[in-house]
Image (cartoon, rainbow, N blue to C red):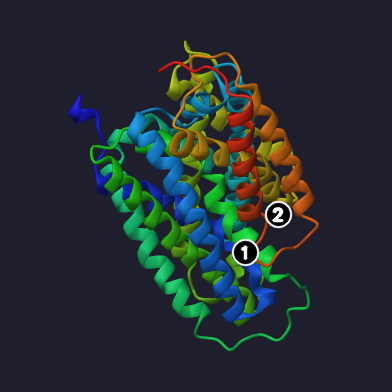
Amino acid sequence: MNNEKTSVFANGLIWFGAGVSIAEILTGMLIAPLGFTKGLAAIFLGHLIGGVLMYLAGIIGAQTEKSSMETVKMAFGAKGSLLFSSLNVLQLIGWTAVMIVSGAATAATVVNLGGTWVWDLVIGALIVVWIMVGIRNLNKLNLVAMNALFILTIVMSMVIFGGNQSPHITSTISFGAAVELSVAMPLSWLPLISDYTRTAKRKQLATIASVVVYNMVSCWMYIIGMGAALFTGESNIASIMLKAGLGIEGLVIIIFSTVTTTFLDAFSAGVSTVSIAKNVNEKRAAVIVCFIGTALAIFIPTTQFENFLYLISSVFAPMIAIQVVDYFILKKSACNQAFNFVNLIVWIIGFAIYRYFMELQTPIGNTVPVMLITGILCIIGNKLFSQKTKEC
């Protein structure tokens, strides 16, 4: 059994690949109107919040050795969790399409092979390769990809920050909104992280390594995006790569960063599908998700990226707040119940509160206040209307 476990190094490599992402760079560009100093503060604060939440979600999976959606059963019941498993599969299909679209569009700007659909297919095929190799056999493949990405992103960073700040940014963003955009990326991994920490040999250390590596690299990508907008005046990352003379090298960054990130989305969609239907094979489900995501990328224009991030946050921020309270404070589990109606009602309230807070523009974003309110409601609701639970 021990040879099936993943090492701390392997977990770190997986999450390095998740952090190096065109999507993170594009999100960093949205923060540029704050200016470099305030933007940097928003990025670090948002990732600190997101990192703490990632750790709490990841350590639950590591300690219980359950996948992310299996841990959701502990808070919402065996059938109640199906709502979140289904929503998770849908958002992962959406992420797969968004990532393939953004990677293919950028790659086509660097090397045009006759249309973005060609690159959609290339990226989709490489993701399938990553899935078939499998999470426990990816060390060597990931190591080569990570080394290439590490060197090339350093070169790109040097080019971007070698320029002078551009005065041409006219859009605006509040500090709280920038914090929320910085929380959104690590928050989007909350329904996935346990899929990888559950197999760790050294549970706590692997979880810490996963969270620290991902958030450090993610901050770096955000800063590259923000710096690209501020110091080059460009909103197209491919144009920056071409200006830097990164032709084929830039293409390597685009392709591998898209594949190593989107692989996690497709693979976790397969794991979540198993939570819905036990007789489904994880790898086959992940490959099907990749096919669907690739088809969506080719035939359906994926827009409103910022709104997509906010929608994910509004669904999964209150969900993880309830999980954390149940596991660490109330110390109970409902996985042998069909539904935990108290927690399901609290989640609906938390979702509504998040959507309301989007209009308020608090200085620290929406996630922290919404999760605090949801957590308090969870404690009160379970104290007043406690349901009998059994050990799973």
Task: Please give the name of the residue rendered at 74% of the width and 83% of the height, measured from the top-left corner.
Answer: 168
| Disc 2: CA contacts within 10 A as few (<14), some (14-19) or many (>=20) | few
State the mark number for residue 179: 1
Task: Please give the name of the residue rendered at 79% of the width and 49% of the height, measured from the top-left corner.
Answer: 356
User: Toward which corner of the image does residue 377 lie, by quadrant?
Assistant: top right
| Disc 1: CA contacts within 10 A as few (<14), some (14-19) or many (>=20) | many
The residue that mark 2 highlights is 306
Image location of residue 39, percent across then percent down: 60, 74
Residue 59 as seen in the image, left or right of residue 383: left
Q: Is residue 176 above or below residue 384?
A: below
- Taking the view exactly as shown, the residue that stands out farthest to the front is 384
Image location of residue 115, percent across then percent down: 66, 49
Q: Nearer the viewer, residue 242 or 67?
A: 67
Q: Is residue 238 above or below residue 385?
A: below
Which marked residue is nearer to the observer: mark 2 or mark 1? 1
Provide the secondary structure element on which disc 2 rests.
Answer: helix
Q: Is residue 234 above or below residue 87?
A: below
Task: Please give the name of the residue rendered at 52% of the width and 52% of the height, measured from the top-left corner.
Answer: 186
Image location of residue 153, percent across then percent down: 43, 67
Q: Nearer the viewer, residue 358 or 242?
A: 358
Image location of residue 362, percent across then percent down: 71, 63
Q: Amino acid at mark 2?
A: Glu
Q: Quadrant of the C terminus?
A: top left
Provide the secondary structure element on which disc 1 rests.
Answer: helix
Distance in Å between CA atoms under marks 2 and 1: 13 Å
User: Toward which corner of the image does residue 151 lie, by quadrant?
Assistant: bottom left
- Taking the view exactly as shown, the residue that stands out farthest to the left is 2
Q: Amino acid at mark 1?
A: Val
For the question of whether residue 97 can be seen, the reply is no
Q: Quadrant of the N terminus?
A: top left
